[in-house]
Amino acid sequence: MVSRPDLARPRAWLFPITAAALFSALVVAMGATTSVTGGWYDRLALPAWAPGDQLYAMGWTLAYGLGAMALLTAWRAMPAGEGEGLLGLFAGAGLLTIGWSHLFFYYHRPDWALYAIGALCLMAVLLIAYCARRSLVAVVMLVPYLGWLSFLALFNMAVVQLNPAFG
């Protein structure tokens, strides 16, 4: 049996696992505190294909679960010094996610949130490009994340179009 040298050093794999899990949990928790779809949201004109509360939860769970695994996979495939850039991109995506959620659900500004989700989609493309240099497995795991964000961007755009008070 061939052992990987990095598995002999717990810190080499423990840090990215812990960072990915904690950061994903933090982003999900912060986003969930503002993503309440009652009251104001219920009065919006929504497209017929609007996601329900359970679809939101499933979409984010899948996106962040695969994202955390992609982070770990890409981190382990990168030589020393490249992983920090990867963590920075994931952190940026997390902050944009929280920003989008706050703008859309907390501040009731889907028009402003449209810019945040656009930046988030761009961040996902940058993440995929960064990971593609070292791990195609990580890229495959990030594709559903980009798909989910693209769906949310289209939904966000439809909400702005259907509610003339915005934009």
Image (tube, rainbow, N blue to C red):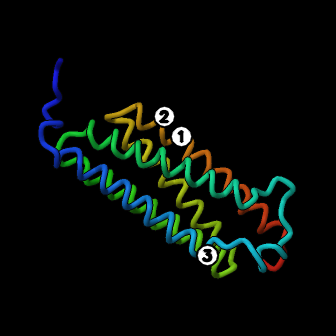
Quadrant (top left, top right, bottom left, bottom right) of the N terminus = top left
Callout 2 touching callout 1 (CB < 8 Å): yes
Which residue does the image show at 70% across and 53% down from the upper left?
Answer: 55
**N-terminal-most mark, 2 or 3:** 3
The relative height of residue 53 versus residue 141 in the rendered view (above or below) is below
Residue 103 is labelled as 3
Q: Could you tell whether 96 is left or right of 89 in the image?
A: right
Q: Quadrant of residue 10?
A: top left
Q: Is residue 112 above or below residue 65?
A: below
Query: Mark 3 belongs to which amino acid?
Result: Leu
In which quarter of the view is residue 164 placed? bottom right
Q: Position of residue 62 (x, y in %)?
A: 56, 47
Q: Amino acid at mark 1?
A: Val
Element at badge 3?
helix
In this view, 167 is above or below 22:
below
Disc 2, SS: helix
Residue 16 image position (x, y, % from top left): 28, 50
Residue at 58 percent across and 55 percent down: it is 60
What secondary structure is marked by label 1?
helix
Q: What is the spatial separation of the Cα atoms under label 2 and label 1, in whole angstroms?
A: 5 Å
Which numbered disc covers residue 28? Answer: none
Side of 139 where 40 appears, left or right: right
What residue would you read off at disc 1? 143
The number of numbered badges drawn on the structure is 3
Q: Earlier in the sequence, mark 1 or mark 3?
A: 3
The residue under the point 16% across, 20% down is 2
Q: Decide if residue 20 is on the left or right side of residue 163.
A: left
Q: Which residue is mark 2?
A: 140
Residues under labels 2 and 3: Cα distance?
A: 29 Å
Query: Residue 15: x, y in percent?
Result: 24, 53
Q: Amino acid at mark 2?
A: Val
Task: Please report contact status of discs 1 and 3: CB closer than 8 Å, yes or no.
Answer: no
